């Protein structure tokens, strides 16, 4: 495998046990550069646990997490972020009283190692302010960049989370149900923004909305009981009767 084709993110025999419960069961996974990859599975399959292991929120019981060729298994969330791994959460982590421009500037200051003095320096560097504004405009948030986050529609708040994650200039972005709680009419906007992200960012999407999954993903992994059940292109996964039975349920198969 050439250096250019080396995976940007890998796991090797990754295990997470909570007492006697195996939440992540010996998962070996590889994400190539520019990937548009979805992670699906029934409730309780271990999707969020797996993402928490990738991002460092949870420590692995055994196995390895490798980011850009480096073993980051014992690295903190912050260290992994600085090495190029960013994520959003199923439940948003925003500060409702801040504005989008300030929220993104905080993330940029963290990237620039100026976080400890961000209150003093937040607007001091015009180049960083311009970068934050440009990022917000690219994600269709230019018109609300000075609004109070808590007053924004929920779909725009989810877009702001993606903007904050992108402010760290990640090589890998983990999107944990970015459309969760978003009204139906606002979901397309989120998908359009995600679809327009540059291929320099490799994406993993965890999502229950199968329409979003099959519109977004080029490849899909299916987790069942914490283990990697099957992996393939979206067409292969859509046609696989085992996936339909496990993930969609017998009733869906009967009427599909």
Image: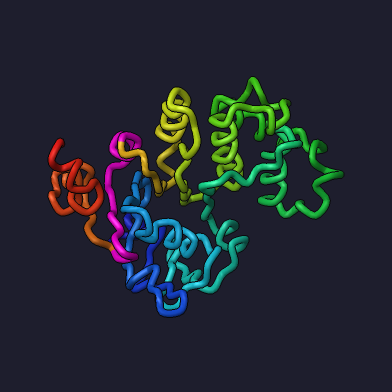
* Residue 145 on image: x %, y %: 68, 27
Residue at the (28%, 63%) spot, across then down: 228
Q: Quadrant of the C terminus?
A: top left
- Residue at image point 71% right, 37% down: 96
Q: What scheme was used to colour the molecule?
A: rainbow
Q: Is residue 2 left or right of residue 75?
A: left
- x and y percentages locating residue 132 in the rendered image: 66, 34
Q: Is residue 54 above or below residue 158?
A: below
At x 38% / y 63%, what residue is drawn? 10
Residue 203 image offset from top left, x and y in percent: 41, 46
Q: Is residue 224 above or below residue 89?
A: below
Name the residue nearer the viewer: 91 or 162.
91
Q: Quadrant of residue 5?
A: bottom left
**Where does the magenta region start and end?**
211-227
The extreme right residue here reads: 120
Is residue 68 a member of the stretch shown in magenta?
Answer: no
| In front of the other: 129 or 96 | 96
Does residue 100 appear left or right of residue 66 in this picture? Answer: right
State the residue lying farthest toward the front.
Answer: 251
Residue 213 lies within the magenta run: yes
- Count of number-bearing discs: 0
Q: Quadrant of residue 217?
A: top left
Split into 4 quadrants, where in the image is the N terminus?
bottom left
- Residue 154 vertical position relative to residue 89 in the rendered view, above or below: above
Horizontal side, residue 190 vs residue 149: left or right = left
Residue 100 location (% of width, % of height) = 68, 33
């Amino acid at each position: 495998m050439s250096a250019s084709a080396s995976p940007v993110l890998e796991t090797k025999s990754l295990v997470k046990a909570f007492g006697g419960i195996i939440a992540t069961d010996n998962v070996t996974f590889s994400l190539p550069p520019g990937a548009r990859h979805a992670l699906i599975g029934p409730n309780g399959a271990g999707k969020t646990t797996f993402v928490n292991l990738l991002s460092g929120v949870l420590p692995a019981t055994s196995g390895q997490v490798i980011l850009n060729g480096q073993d980051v298994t014992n690295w903190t969330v912050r260290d992994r972020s600085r090495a190029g791994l960013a994520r959003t959460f199923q439940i948003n982590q925003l500060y409702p009283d801040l504005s989008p421009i300030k929220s993104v500037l905080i993330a940029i200051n963290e990237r620039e190692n100026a976080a400890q003095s961000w209150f003093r320096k937040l607007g001091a560097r015009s180049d960083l302010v311009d970068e934050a504004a440009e990022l917000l405009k690219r994600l269709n948030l230019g018109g609300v960049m000075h609004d109070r986050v808590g007053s924004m529609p929920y779909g725009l708040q989810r877009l702001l989370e993606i903007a904050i994650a992108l402010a760290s200039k990640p090589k890998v972005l983990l999107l944990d149900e970015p459309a969760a709680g978003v009204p139906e009419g606002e979901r397309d906007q989120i998908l359009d923004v995600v679809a327009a992200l540059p291929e320099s960012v490799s994406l993993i999407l965890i999502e229950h909305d199968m329409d979003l999954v099959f519109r977004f993903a080029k490849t899909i992994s299916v987790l069942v009981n914490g283990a990697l059940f099957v992996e393939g292109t979206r067409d292969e996964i859509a046609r696989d009767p085992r996936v339909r039975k496990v993930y969609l349920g017998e009733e869906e198969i009967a009427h599909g």
